Image (cartoon, grey):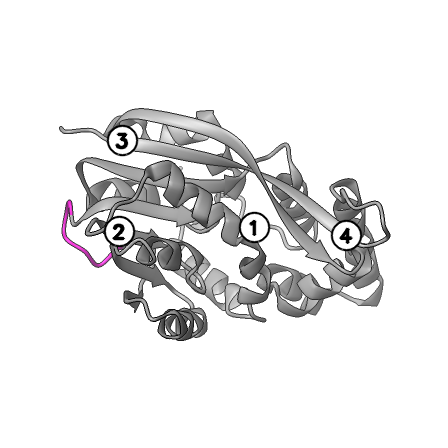
Amino acid sequence: MATTPTDYRAITERQQAMWATGDYHEIARQMMSASDALCTALDLHAGQRVLDVACGSGNTALSAARRYCEVTGIDYVPALLERAKARAAAEGVTVDFRVADAQALPFADASFDVVLSVFGVMFAPDQERAARELLRVCRPGGKIGLVCWMPEAFGGEFFTVHARYLPAPPEVKPAIRWGTAVGLDELLRAGVSSMQHERRSLFEYYRSTDHAVDVFRAYFGPTRWALEKSDAQTQTDLHRDLAAVFNRYNRATDGTMMLEAEYLQTIATRSSR
């Protein structure tokens, strides 16, 4: 029996609408340390051509631009790009921000010395195609730097909760596949000569666990979508389950919240073939 091809375009359009809900910048601004750490690990130098894939409101693009790299940032949520442009203007740095899809990058082969993505490309529905695009636009001998949530830490638990209330299409592989050495080997190994992984942590700060949940309910697209598609009892259950995850990773002892979010940082070298 013939199988129906996965309609990745329709899935991407729904996902785009979801991420455009709320204001992801209110979450991402507390993750700047991961962007800076990645740029430091890559030892970015002035003049390098750098692409930030699924750049959101610009954290990683701005970190690279501060080093006088020639930076391009792409995302499929125009409102986030407008925020990124405003941040770049406020800092006095130059970044070429464009609306584009990580699964179909509008650049020629080998256009960039370094290709980055921080909590971004991992959410592309067609993972194999997105991985091929990262490899295609990176020059031979160039670097690919990724920061992704892992299955066994905060990010994995957080998105597992969301999957219970807002399940992805069964043909779409979990985003946290990108946060594993095995998954990245499957996605990138054919086009890279080396790949190094490092587990790192970032910290987010809130007034309390309930405040953290409220921030995500107000600004984080997937949480907002799950709530909008739920009845009152389900909304209560989602709030409870998210609070439980936040509590497990709260390192504060004074009644506030210091969320430890562990992630996988990966640096790969594009093969010369």
Residue wearing tag 3: 269
Q: Main secondary structure of the magenta part?
A: loop
Give the mark, 3 or 4, whose residue is nearer the N terminus: 4
Tag on residue 50?
Answer: 2
Query: Is residue 112 shown left or right of residue 203?
Result: left
**Mark 3, residues whose alpha carbon is within 10 Å: few (<14), some, or many (≥20)?**
many
Look at mark 4 in the image and give the residue it sits on: 257
- Label located before the other in sequence (4 or 2): 2
| Earlier sequence position, callout 3 versus callout 1 | 1
Q: Quadrant of the N terminus?
A: top left
- Return the residue at label 1: 168
Does residue 6 lie above or below 151 as drawn? below
In this picture, residue 273 sits left or right of residue 105: left
CA gap between label 1 and label 2 equals 31 Å
Q: Nearer the viewer, mark 1 or mark 4?
A: 4
Does 107 appear in magenta?
yes
- Identity, as a three-letter code, of the amino acid under mark 3: Thr
Q: Estimate the x, y position of residue 124 in percent, counting from the top left.
A: 42, 50
Q: Amino acid at mark 4?
A: Met
